Image: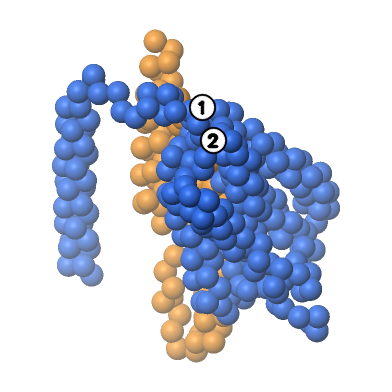
Chain colours: A orange, B blue
């Protein structure tokens, strides 16, 4: 009974996190949601009896992919800022975030 | 504007209904599977002795289906080549990391190395293995870079490239050597299969760790003593 409750809670939170990560307009928030999705996903792999996949998911899916996405976001923002400074004479508000 | 939004909404509805249909179809297919079908688990269990390791997942990944792992290493290398050839990415701002990150990384990195070694060794008979150990090493590298460390330019040239290629290279060389002594390609024979798998995994761990850390850095590290 407890297992059923835990598993269904895990599955529902996975779906909810996935939905929030996909629809979040704030990219930083979306990445944090993606990382938490990866951590819960590795829990789900443990519950499915696949500890190997869970280890890989936690290390690669949640850890390194999250770090890569955050790095990409930081670079996008620095590139966007440089572009904004360069072309800020006529057009403002073109960057909707 | 409203027109645009309307088409976006319609597209989203269409996508949702399509995905729901696929999910229902998948669920139907899974429920329709016969329960008596046991898959290949028993076959792996019966041949586990011959694989050189005692953990079935490692046996499948490195011995029975070594081809997949070989290609995965290739994919990782190609990804790095793609990132490097894009080039021109700005490096992170040189800012001092702050005392917390500095001290924490000094404490954590030796431990991450130890964990990586443990995962590599334990992979022969319990969950673990080269990819997990390599990603832990890669995480250690990411942490070091966040703390302001950069690879010394003396090592960033040939040595770094050799380490990155070595994972795939050793795998291919060992497999080809198997071909030369009369086995099939990627066919590790019982007397030395365990040692060969450990060798491949150890080199692959280093290579994966270096590749993942380099993927995080994004740009090709500067080469040469004059910098």
Percent coordinates x, y for residue B51 in the rendering = 51, 34
Q: How many marks?
A: 2
User: Would you place residue A38 above or below residue B127 in this image?
Assistant: below
Q: Nearer the viewer, residue A26 or B143?
A: B143
Q: Which residue of the protein is positioned furthest toward the bottom in this rendering? A: A89
| Chain identity of mark 2 | B
**Quadrant position of residue B225:** bottom right
- Bin the neighbour count of mark 2 within 10 Å (Cα to Cα): few under 14, some 14-19, many 20 and up: few
Q: Left or right: where does residue A13 sit relative to residue A42?
A: left
Which numbered disc covers residue B190?
A: 2
- The answer to whether residue B165 of the structure is visible from this angle is yes
Q: Residue at x 48, y 60 (%)?
A: B74
Q: Nearer the viewer, residue A5 or B224?
A: B224
Which numbered disc covers residue B49?
A: 1
- Bin the neighbour count of mark 1 within 10 Å (Cα to Cα): few under 14, some 14-19, many 20 and up: few
Percent coordinates x, y for residue B213 in the rendering = 63, 59
Label 2–label 1 contact, CB within 8 A? yes
Q: Residue at x 59, y 56 (%)?
A: B170
User: Would you place residue B75 above or below residue A50 in this image?
Assistant: below
Quarter occupied by the C terminus of chain A: bottom left
Q: Nearer the viewer, mark 2 or mark 1?
A: 2
């Amino acid at each position: 009974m407890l297992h059923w409750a835990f598993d269904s809670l895990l599955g529902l939170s996975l779906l909810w996190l996935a939905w929030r990560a996909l629809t979040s307009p704030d990219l930083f928030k979306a990445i944090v949601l993606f990382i938490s999705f990866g951590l819960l996903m590795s829990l789900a792999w443990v519950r499915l009896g696949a500890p190997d996949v869970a280890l890989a998911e936690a290390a690669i899916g949640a850890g390194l992919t999250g770090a890569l996405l955050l790095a990409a976001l930081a670079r996008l923002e620095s590139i966007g800022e440089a572009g904004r400074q360069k072309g800020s004479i006529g057009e403002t508000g073109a960057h909707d975030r | 504007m409203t027109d645009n939004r309307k088409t976006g909404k319609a597209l989203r509805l269409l996508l949702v209904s399509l995905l729901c249909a696929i999910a229902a179809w998948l669920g139907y297919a899974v429920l329709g599977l016969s329960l008596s079908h046991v898959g290949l688990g028993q076959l792996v269990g019966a041949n586990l002795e011959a694989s050189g390791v005692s953990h079935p997942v490692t046996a499948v990944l490195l011995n029975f289906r070594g081809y997949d792992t070989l290609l995965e290493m290739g994919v990782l290398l190609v990804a790095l080549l793609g990132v490097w050839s894009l080039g021109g990415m700005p490096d992170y701002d040189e800012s001092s990391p702050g005392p917390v990150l500095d001290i924490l990384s000094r404490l954590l990195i030796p431990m991450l190395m130890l964990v990586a070694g443990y995962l590599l060794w334990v992979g022969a008979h319990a969950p673990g293995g080269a990819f997990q150990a390599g990603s832990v090493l890669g995480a250690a590298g990411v942490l070091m870079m966040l703390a302001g460390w950069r690879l010394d330019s003396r090592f960033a040239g040939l040595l770094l490239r050799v380490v990155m290629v070595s994972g795939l290279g050793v795998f291919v060389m060992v497999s080809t050597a198997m071909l030369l002594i009369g086995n099939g390609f990627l066919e590790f024979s019982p007397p030395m299969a365990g040692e060969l798998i450990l060798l491949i995994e150890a080199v692959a761990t280093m290579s994966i760790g270096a590749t993942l850390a380099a993927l995080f850095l994004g740009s090709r590290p500067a080469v040469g003593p004059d910098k």
